[in-house]
Image (spheres, rainbow, N blue to C red):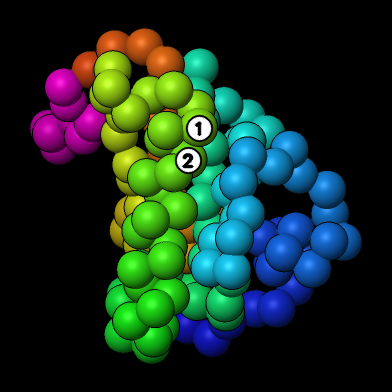
Amino acid sequence: MAYDPENIFARILRGEIPCKKVYEDDWALAFHDINPLMPVHVLVIPKGPYVSLDDFSAKAPAEALGGFLKAVGEVARLMGVDESGYRIVANSGADANQEVPHFHVHVFGGRRIGGRMIKPQD
């Protein structure tokens, strides 16, 4: 899949659409999800045109990979879930229900999260 520079996260990165920013550095931007599923639900996106985790891991330079991972950890600390616990989720591709074609990680926390995320197929 080719990167679409008009996707909503690309537009947020360019400042065309506002966001409730949590963190920003040279490698990533983090902001509150507009439809939170948990008390803490923050999206972390890299500052580059990457469609998915597969695309990001294959094409991003080592500095961007490391910088992004550090940003995810910093978001957990800023949101106060680093000690109580949090979950990170990255949906990658159609079968994973990735809705925005720009790689992103969801940081969930703020209350106990159930142990199972995936319901077995009948």
Contact, mark 1 vs mark 2 (Cβ under 8 Å):
yes
Q: Which mark is on residue 26?
A: none
The answer to whether residue 93 is visible is no
Position of residue 54 relative to residue 37, above or below, is below
- The residue to which callout 2 is attached is 75
Left/right placement of residue 37 relative to residue 34 reads left
- The residue to which callout 1 is attached is 78
Q: Does the magenta stretch mainly form a helix, a strand or a loop?
A: loop
Estimate the x, y position of residue 27 in percent, counting from the top left: 53, 68
Q: What is the distance, in whole Å, between disc 1 and disc 2 at their CAs?
A: 5 Å
The answer to whether residue 20 is visible is yes
Position of residue 13 relative to residue 76, above or below, is below
Q: Mark 1, residues whose alpha carbon is within 10 Å: few (<14), some, or many (≥20)?
A: few
- What secondary structure is marked by label 2? helix
Q: Quadrant of residue 73?
A: top left
| Residue depicted at 42% across the width and 16% down the height | 110
- What secondary structure is marked by label 1? helix
Estimate the x, y position of residue 34 in percent, counting from the top left: 68, 34
Specify the quadrant that holds the C terminus: top left
Q: Mark 2, residues whose alpha carbon is within 10 Å: few (<14), some, or many (≥20)?
A: many
Estimate the x, y position of residue 59 in percent, counting from the top left: 38, 87
Looking at the rendering, the stretch of residues picked out in magenta corresponds to 115-122
